[in-house]
Amino acid sequence: MAEWIYFLHPPRDDFAATMTDEERAAFAAHAAWLGRLLADGVLVLAGPTLGTVNTADDPVARGGFARAELRPYQLGFLRGRD
C-alpha cells in the first residue's frame, strides 16, 4: 500500500482565528470527509496545524536546501484511537 502525506496550506496565517462562515462550513465538510476515510481504514492520522509558521534550525533549511515548516499541531483523527 502506498503511503501519502497531504498538506493544506491556509490562505492566511491567522486562518483558524479568522475563518468566515463559508470557510468554517467547508472545513466542517472536510472534517466529515476525513472521518469517513478514517472509518474506511484509509486515513491514519490528521489534524490542523495552528499558529504561524516557525522555521526549525535545521541545517538543510538554514543552508537554503529545503523550506522547513514547523507549526504547533493538534491531533484530530488517529486510526486505532478510541
Image: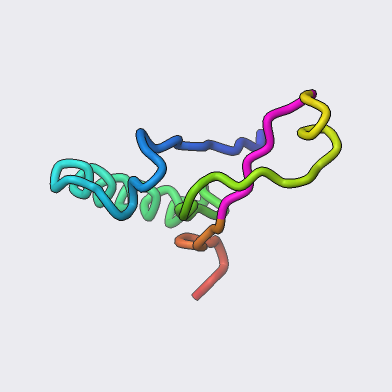
| Number of marks | 0
Task: Name the outermost residue toward the left.
Answer: 21
Main SS, magenta residues:
loop
Image vertical order of residue 25 relative to residue 12, above or below: below
When the figure is inspected, residue 7 is found, relative to residue 57, above or below; the finding is above
Residue extending farthest to the top is 65
Horizontal side, residue 25 vs residue 17: left or right: left
Q: In this view, does 2 lie above or below 21?
A: above
Q: Residue at x 47, y 54 (%)?
A: 51
Residue 46 position in % (x across, y down): 50, 53
21 lies left or right of 73: left
Residue 59 is situated, as x and y percent measured from the top left of the image, at 85, 37
Q: Which residue is drawn at 54% across and 58% down?
A: 73
- Residue extending farthest right: 59
Q: Image point 68% across, 30% down: which residue?
A: 67
Specify the segment rendered in magenta.
65-71
Q: Give the quarter of the figure containing the N terminus.
A: top right
Residue 33 counted in the magenta span: no
Give coordinates of residue 71: x percent, y percent. Answer: 57, 51
Asked if residue 70 is among those painted magenta in the image, a careful observer would answer yes
Q: Is residue 42 above or below residue 76?
A: above
Q: Position of residue 19 (x, y in %)?
A: 24, 47
The image's colouring method is rainbow
Residue 71 or 34: which is nearer the viewer?
71
Residue 61 as seen in the image, left or right of residue 33: right
Left or right of residue 23, residue 57 in this image = right
